[in-house]
Image (cartoon, helix red, strand yellow):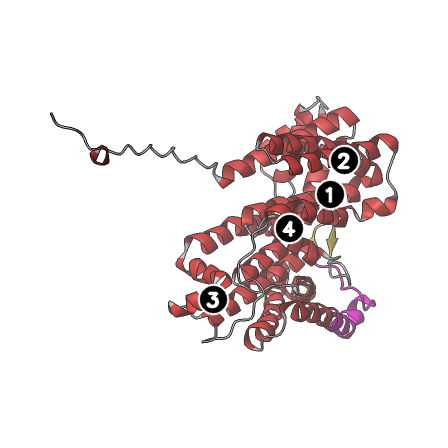
Amino acid sequence: MTTLNPADAPITVPAAPPPRRRVPGWARGAFAAAAAVAVLVVTSALTGQHELTSSGTAQAALRLMLPILLAGLGGLWAERAGVINLGLEGMLILGTWGGAFAGLAWGPWAAVLGGVIFGALGGLLHALATVTFGVNHIVSGVAITLLAAGLTKYLSTLIFQPVSHNPRQSAPLTGFDTYSVQPLGSWLGTLEDRHTPMLSDVAGLLRGLITGFTPLVVIGLLLVPISYWVLWRTRFGLRLRSCGENPYAAESLGVSVYRYKYAAVVISGALAGLGGVALVLNPGQLGYLEGQTGGRGYIGLAAMIFGNWRPGGLLAGAALFGYVDGLQLRAGAQAVHDLLYGASLLAIVVAIAWALRRRWLASVLAAAAGIAAYAVYFLTDTLPREFATYAPQLVTLVVLAVAAQRLRPPAADGLEYRRGAE
């Protein structure tokens, strides 16, 4: 009789569970955009504040988000290579002046080129200070912003004042023609004018996005997928991002870290300069005006952080800030007050979503924020004008506080690099 030794018994290995299929990033973004539109539509219908979804508000939001988006893209390029670019505000300022100078002489396309060149020069100066001389990135960025403000003030007095008779602004510029997608725009306009609940709201938002835009808007939006493709789908982008994650490992593989950092920061400045051009060629205010950047470089940096150093998330953050800015400019404090109702709805939706993922602390905090927003809406009839004016900046602070839970910056972001040292 043969006895089976337990040691010889076959070992049964349990099958590994199938890997969970991740939802593609574009699908998550589309779902988030649809949810935001749904909240705006419901809020407009329940509060009667039709400016929340009017085509004029959507147009203003698209134009105002453009400099924020381009500044954020500039920050994305620099920080993916490991260089913190706090000088985006200064590069925006340089872009506004360079765009106005070239635009006055040679037209709008020259303005684009002039703004890009001036912004790139600011990026080159930042790269020289941080990459070559090892200056602290924050100190260099602040210094460039102060230098840009002083330099453009001097140049405006020297060049613009004899023509405009005002050292703080230029003469009016010639802008781009505006375009619309027809006949779709007219059909959506007809739907919007009918004031049908919800249907007209959606039509108004869509109409604002496809009418009255300029070539600069198209270029800015195309730069989002282009940046993603270059940074995540090309050899150049892979090497550039490796400089921001582990430059010494990249160096050991033959990557010229200095060259890629320089390229990234110069491109960063060029993109921020293009954002400055978007300000001076805004159809609502064609020309250079001292202080017209209004901190949008810093808001662009916040949008980049909100987007977790990814182009798609950056686009969402820039759209949020641009929308709030456009709304308060068009409809004032009352519309921002009614937007609190929508914010409370959105916070409750987010709380439920986090609860389903068993993130209890985040869910409780989101629910508390939603209750607080609704309490302010319910207990007040309107908001102070000063609150509405600084609503984009306040949204920046709130969004950064929420986004801080899931941030993952490049590992070597802001760290000094020296060839051959580790």
Between residue 214 and residue 66, name the one nearer to us.
66
Residue 374, relative to residue 271: is it above or below? Answer: above
Residue 153, relative to residue 194: is it above or below? Answer: below
Q: Which residue is mark 2?
A: 339
Q: Earlier in the sequence, mark 2 or mark 1?
A: 1
Using the numbered discs, state the Cα–Cα distance from disc 2 to disc 1 in whole angstroms: 9 Å
Badge 1 marks a residue whose secondary structure is helix
Query: Can residue 76 be seen?
Result: yes
The residue located at (18%, 30%) in the rendering is 4
Give amino acid for label 3. Answer: Pro
Q: Which residue is mark 4?
A: 303
The magenta span reads: 149-176
Residue 372 is a magenta residue? no
Using the numbered discs, state the Cα–Cα distance from disc 2 to disc 3 in whole angstroms: 45 Å
Instruction: Say which quarter of the image contains residue 92.
Output: bottom right
Contact between labelled residues 1 and 2, with CB atoms less than 8 Å apart: yes
Q: Residues within 10 Å of mark 1 (few under 14, many from 20)?
A: many
Q: Residues within 10 Å of mark 2 (few under 14, many from 20)?
A: many
Instruction: Locate residue 120, reporting x and y percent.
Output: 59, 67
Query: Can residue 175 be seen?
Result: no
Give amino acid for label 4. Answer: Ala
Quadrant assignment for the N terminus: top left
Badge 4 marks a residue whose secondary structure is helix
The residue located at (70%, 26%) in the rendering is 42
Any mark on residue 324, and which?
Answer: 1
Contact between labelled residues 2 and 4, with CB atoms less than 8 Å apart: no
Q: Earlier in the sequence, mark 3 or mark 1?
A: 3
Query: Which of labels 2 and 3 is toward the front?
Result: 3
Query: Which of labels 3 and 1 is toward the front?
Result: 3
Any mark on residue 247, and which?
Answer: 3
Q: Earlier in the sequence, mark 4 or mark 2?
A: 4
Badge 3 marks a residue whose secondary structure is helix
